[in-house]
Image (cartoon, rainbow, N blue to C red):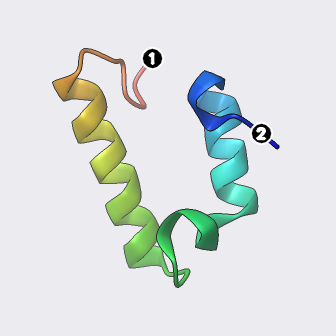
Amino acid sequence: MTNLIDMSELGYFSQFAKRTGMFIGRTSLIGATAFMVGYVQAAQRYGGPGLET
């Protein structure tokens, strides 16, 4: 089993790409976009780089 908490961002999004439905339920572009926006917002709030390098 993969521990998502200890993964790098690249590894995390690799898992997201392989198993999108596991993260957002029904797979759709709107759902994936909302997930990514939420990820960026949480990263900015807690001091992470988000998707920007």
Q: Position of residue 29 (x, y in %)?
A: 47, 76
Q: Nearer the viewer, residue 43 or 33?
A: 43
Q: Which residue is mark 1?
A: 53
Instruction: Please tell me which residue is depicted at 76% across the width and 59% down the height of the picture.
Output: 18
Q: Position of residue 34 (x, y in %)?
A: 32, 63
Secondary structure at numbered mark 1: loop
> In the image, is 16 to the left or to the right of 40?
right
Circle number at residue 3:
none
Secondary structure at numbered mark 2: loop
Q: Position of residue 20 (x, y in %)?
A: 62, 66
Q: Nearer the viewer, residue 30 or 45?
A: 45
The residue lying furthest to the left in this view is 45
Instruction: Please tell me which residue is depicted at 52% across the width and 84% down the height of the picture.
Output: 26
Q: Which residue is mark 2?
A: 2
Q: Earlier in the sequence, mark 2 or mark 1?
A: 2
> In the image, is 25 to the left or to the right of 49?
right
Q: What amino acid type should be assigned to the residue bearing mark 2?
A: Thr
Q: What amino acid type should be assigned to the residue bearing mark 1?
A: Thr
The quarter of the picture where the N terminus appears is top right
Q: Label 1: how many residues lie within 10 Å, few (<14), some (14-19) or many (20+)?
A: few
